[in-house]
Image (spheres, rainbow, N blue to C red):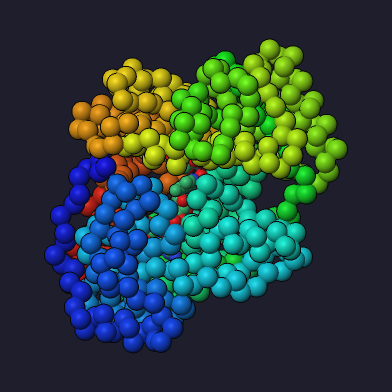
Amino acid sequence: GLSGGRPPRDDKFARVTQEDVQYFREALGAGGRLVTDREGLQAFNRDWLGNFEGATSVAVCPTSTQQVSKVLSYCNERCLAVVPQGGNTGLVGGSVPVHDEVVLSTSAMDNIISFDEVSGILNCQSGCILQALDTYLAERGHTMPLDLGAKGSCQIGGNVSTNAGGVRLLRYGSLHGSVLGLEVVLANGEVLDLWQSLRKDNTGYDLKQLFIGAEGTLGIVTGMSLLCPARPTSVQVSFLSCKSFPDVLHIFRLAKQHLGEVLSAVEFLDRESLVTALEHMPGIRNPLPDGTSPFYMLVETSGSSETHDKNKVEEFLAEVMSAGLLVDGALAQDTSQASNMWRVREGVTEALVRRGKVYKYDVSLPLAEMYALVEEMRERLPGDSIRVVGYGHVGDGNLHLNISDARGKERQEVREAIEPFVYEWTRERRGSISAEHGLGLMKAECIRYSKPEAAVRIMGAVKKMLDPKGILNPYKVLPRDVVHEGC
Ligand code: FAD
Ligand code: S2G
Ligand code: ZN
C-alpha cells in the first residue's frame, strides 16, 4: 500500500541492456551469482509484506567489496539506478525496486572476518544473517547487540542501513552505539574506509553515523566492526496481564526499579494482538489462562546468576501484585516456556499478514500517549472486517499500530481514514512517524511530519554530495522535491 502512490519512473536513468548484464557477469567472475530469469527475480522484486513489487531485470550478488565497487562505478557511469538489498525483510518498501532499478544484493557477502573474545569486537561482511552471527557468537560466550523477529533472514548490513531497533534496544542501545566501524562503497565506486575497531575515536566528524539508517541512499555498506556484549548465562522471561495502559507503564516503572541492571526487554501487546497471534500462528499457546485482559507484557532479564536473577524477578512480580497491577502472571520455568512467550510477541507480525491486508505504522510517541493512538484509530475505523492492534517496545516508546483487514486487499476508504491522520497525530505530539522501520518508499514524502525543513534540506545536500547522480535507491527516504536532478 503506497501512501503517496507509486512515483513515475525517472527517465534520467538508463535502462539495462545486454551489454550491462555482460559487464556485471564479468565483474563478478566465475563465482558470482547474477539472476536474470523472471522466476528467480521474483524474490528480489517483491517485499516481505507483498505490498511493493518492482520490475528489475537483473539482480547482482557480489562476493567482495571490490566487486561492489566495480558494479557501482559502472552503474554510476551508465546512470543506472541501483537498489541495495540485504535480507529483504524491510517493511517500508525500501529494499525492492520501484521500477527497473538494478538490485545489488549482499547475500553472497557473508564472511565472518574476525572476533576478539576479550574486547567482544566482531568484524564481518554485510551479508551475514543476524541469526548466524548470534549463533557464531554464542559459541564464543557473546551475543549480538540486537534481536528482532526477522533474525532468520535479515542481514547485518540491512540492520545497520535501517538502524534496526528490535526487542533488546532497551538493554544494548541502538546500532549508532554498537557499530564501531563501517566500510561503505559510494555511488561512484569509491571505497570509504571507516572501518575502525576502536571504542573511542574522536578524530573529526563521525561519518559512519550518516550511513546507519540511510536505507541504502548514501552508499552500500560492505563490512563492519561491531561491539558485542558478553552472552548472559541467565535469562528470565515473565508474561503478565493487566487492566489498562497506565498499568502497563506503572509495571514498566517497577521493572526498571526492581530489575534495573539485568532488565533486557519490556514489550507489550494488547488483547487484539494476542488473539491474532493465537488465531493464526499454530504452535504457540497463551502463556496465561487469562485471555480476556486488555493488555499483556513480556518482561525479560538477562544476567549472570540464575538464583540472583530469579529472586529479583520474583520480588518484582510480588511488588506488581501488591500494587494491585497484576491480573495474571507467569515466570517461564524452562526454555520452551520462555521461547513460547517470545513467539507469542514476535508472532504478531506474521499473524497479521496471514489474517489479510495490513496497514502498518511504526511510531515513537511520548510514553503516556503511546496507546491513545490505537484507541483513536478504533473510533475512526469501521468494525467490520477491520481489527486495530497495538503492540511494541514499551521501553523505547515505540508503538506498532497495525490495522488489519480480513478482506485481503487495499481499500481507499480505510487508507483515507488512517492517513494523514496518524502522521498528523504523531506530529502534534512531536513523535516520530518511523521509530525503527525507516521511511523507504512508503513514507518517502512524509519526513516533514517529523523533521524540520532545515534538516530536510541538509539531508538533500548530503545526498547530493555523496550520490550526485542520485542512482542509489531513488524514490526513497527523501521527498522528491529535495532530491535534485543529476545524471
Ligand atoms: P532489506 O530489507 O534488504 O533492506 C532494508 C533497507 O536497507 C533498504 O532500504 C535497503 O536498500 C537497505 N540496505 C540493505 N542492505 C544494505 C547495505 N548492505 N548497504 C546499504 N543499504 C542496504 N525492524 C526493526 O527495526 N525492529 C523489529 O523488531 C523488526 N521486527 C521485524 C519482524 C519481522 C517478522 C519482519 C519481517 C521485519 C521486522 N523488522 C524489524 C523490519 C526489518 O527486519 C528490518 O528493517 C531489518 O533491519 C531489515 O534487514 P534486511 O537485511 O532484511 O534489509
Ligand atoms: C516488531 C515488526 C514489524 C511489525 O514486531 O517489533 O518491528 O510492525 C515489529 O509487526
Ligand atoms: Zn519493532
Residue closer to the observer: 422 or 330: 330
Instruction: Determine whether 289 is above or below 306 in the image.
Output: above
Residue 24 horizontal/vertical position (percent): 31, 81
In which quadrant is the N terminus drawn?
top left
Closer to the camera in the image, 86 or 120:
86
Which residue is located at x 46 percent, y 77 percent? 63
Residue 108 lies, in percent from the top left, at 46, 72
- Residue displayed at 25% across by 32% down: 415
Q: Is residue 455 visible?
A: no
| Residue 284, quarter of picture | top right
- In the rendered image, residue 255, in percent from the top left (x then y), is placed at 69, 29
Q: Is residue 458 left or right of residue 204?
A: left
Left or right of 45 on screen, residue 115: right
Residue 104 horizontal/vertical position (percent): 36, 69
Quadrant housing the C terminus: bottom left
Q: Quadrant of residue 310?
A: top right
Name the residue: 68% across, 69% down.
Answer: 115
Q: Is 116 located above or below residue 30 in the figure?
A: above
Question: Which residue occupies the foreground of this view, 117 or 364?
Answer: 117
The residue located at (38%, 83%) in the rendering is 28
* Residue 122 visible within the image: yes
Above or below — where is 8 with respect to 12? above
Left/right placement of residue 329 relative to residue 470 reads right
Above or below, 412 against 76 in this view is above
What residue occupies the far front of the structure in this picture?
Answer: 282
Location of residue 236 by image quarter? top right
